[in-house]
Amino acid sequence: MQLSDVLADRWSCRAFRGDAVPEATLREVLALAQRTPSWCNTQPWHVHVVSGEATARFAESLTAHVRANPPSSDLPMPQEYTGVYQQRRRESGFALYESLGIERSDLHARGQQMLKNYAFFGAPHVAVVTTDRAQGVYGAIDCGGYVTNLVNAAHAHGVATVPQAAIAMFSDHVRAFLGLPDDRLVVCAVALGFADQDHPVNAFRTTRATVDEVVTFVD
């Protein structure tokens, strides 16, 4: 695929089929993501790819943890969403619930949909991306670039993805499950698999701001 086609077509999958992606395909995708530029070429990311029975154990234990414990993230979460950022966030959320026929007032159904984050929306694989603690915010920024290349490379190979900051909100459990050392910080996860094209949640698409809305040209 042309890069322009990948950027125009990629979307976040929220319902996966159960069949696994061949390991050779995963390795090709990960090798492409490894070409991500980073500060002084430090490549601060490390990725744990969870597959098979381990994915089911991870999903079950994480969901149980989320039900019983408050969030505990390694990185600061957004303090608040205001103005256009809140507007974009709400637009995306309303489109999600509308695709599923969930009323805005139905807090129970919205909560149940939220919990699907922690089962990785049924994906057979989940890649947990961590950064080197000592590299601070710029290490996390480099990991963001890595995640972008990972999801785009996956799309080019016919693999659906969804980046999941929600997983990092419970970094304490992720750290325990994966046995992460103290020098690693959980940035996010990326669920990977083949999309369930018949599921209504995969029918909606988010919008993007125009160039003029987000870019200031200085002559």
Image (cartoon, rainbow, N blue to C red):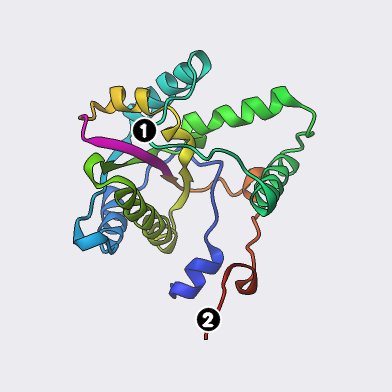
Residue drawn at the location 42% of the way across and 61% of the way down: 152
Q: Which residues are magenta?
A: 182-191
Which residue lies at the image location 32% right of the left edge and 36% below the top edge? 51
**Residue 30 locus on image (x, y percent):** 28, 54
The picture places residue 216, in percent across and down from the top left corner, at 57, 74
Q: Is residue 94 left or right of residue 20?
A: right
Q: Residue furthest bottom?
A: 219
User: What residue sits 37% from the left and 41% below the top?
Assistant: 187
SS for dot 1 = loop
Task: Choose top left, top right, bottom left or bottom right for residue 8.
Answer: bottom right
- Identify the residue shown where x is 55% and y is 65%: 9
Dominant secondary structure of the residues highlighted in magenta in the image: strand
Q: Quadrant of residue 142?
A: bottom left
Residue 60 within the magenta-colored segment of the rendering: no
Q: Earlier in the sequence, mark 2 or mark 1?
A: 1
Q: What amino acid is at disc 1? A: Asp
Q: CA distance from mark 2 to mark 1?
A: 37 Å
Q: Amino acid at mark 2?
A: Val
- Residue 189 horizontal side relative to residue 115, left or right: left
Is residue 185 in view from this perspective?
yes
Image coords of residue 150 (percent x, y): 37, 56
The disc at residue 218 is 2
Q: Is residue 126 visible?
A: no
Q: Which residue is mark 1?
A: 74
Q: Is residue 104 left or right of residue 136?
A: right
